[in-house]
Amino acid sequence: MKGRLRSIDIPENIWEKFVLQWDEIEKMGSDEVLKYLSNKGMSQPLITEIGCGTGDFLLKLSEYYSDFSIIGIDHAYTVIQRAVKKMSEKEIKNVVLINFDASKLVEKTGEKIKFNKIFITFPDPWPKKKHHKRRLIQTQYLEELYNILDENGELIIISDHPDYQKWIYNKLVDFNKFKPILKDRIYTDDMEEYKSMYPFTESTFYKKSLVKGHTTNFYLLRKWGLIWKKRYSEHY
């Protein structure tokens, strides 16, 4: 298939150092998963990037949140390979990766693992209407993410796809459990405003959005607060 990345060679010891073995995690209970993470040098507070791709944003997260343990998740094996390569070359100490479908995160690990921040960066928009059910941002998934955030945890979603942006906005309003971090706004499209609060890097996906002339929206939410539904009741 055009554009598909080729597999690259990663030494076994490097792979084992940076990649959590999903086939092992699947067999574990939540307590065992916590112990497994601890053995990999991971401790709470945890941050995760869902859809980490080749690791450009993970590198920025690692630097910005140097006192946090960070987990990058992506279902594509070849992009995880490239992320591992970057983490190894930069000798990153606070990042590990998982190669699996992020929609199964809560189902497989339970709710004992709590995250301080969850970043979802440029999720697949599945633009055809018949494929909308495959979109990651669904009401049930928001519920699962809400449950694995710690008391003051934050959810940050970044998207440049116009139709998916409307979908995300409407799903967040309907879910109605997160509190906007920005005053009276669920998202910002002001890059400088976002960067005053969180890290960012011009990843491949972001550069593609610029070529397409798309505006990037940053949805910034915090747990333990309600979106004022009356104010946001008008959907896109």
Image (spheres, rainbow, N blue to C red):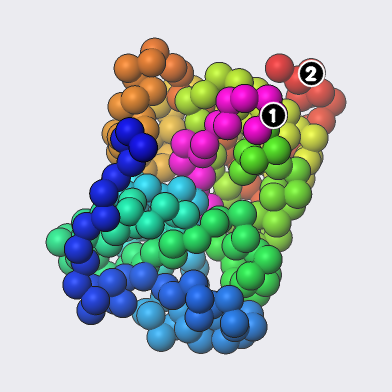
**Numbered badge on residue 53:** none
Q: Position of residue 4 (x, y in %)?
A: 33, 41
User: Looking at the picture, does residue 172 appear above or below residue 127?
Assistant: below
Give the residue drawn at x 39%, y 13%: 213
Name the image quarter holding residue 163.
Answer: top right
Give the residue drawn at x 68%, y 25%: 129
Q: CB under 8 Å between callouts 1 and 2?
A: no
**Numbered badge on residue 234:** 2
Amino acid at circle 2: Glu
Whether residue 68 can be seen here: no
Q: Secondary structure at mark 2?
A: loop
Q: Is residue 29 left or right of residue 120?
A: right
Q: Is residue 113 left or right of residue 98?
A: right
Q: Is residue 133 left or right of residue 78?
A: right
- Camera-side residue: 14 or 12? 12
Whether residue 153 can be seen here: yes
Disc 1 designates what residue? 130
First along the sequence among labels 1 and 2:
1
Bounds of the magenta span? Answer: 117-131
Q: Point out the frontmost of discs 1 and 2.
A: 1
User: Is residue 70 covered in magenta?
Assistant: no
Name the image quarter holding residue 204.
Answer: top left
Position of the N terminus, as image quadrant, is: top left
Q: Secondary structure at mark 1?
A: helix
Q: Residue furthest front?
A: 1
Q: Position of residue 217 (x, y in %)?
A: 51, 26
Name the image quarter holding residue 106.
Answer: bottom right
Give the residue drawn at x 63%, y 47%: 222
Q: Residue furthest left?
A: 89
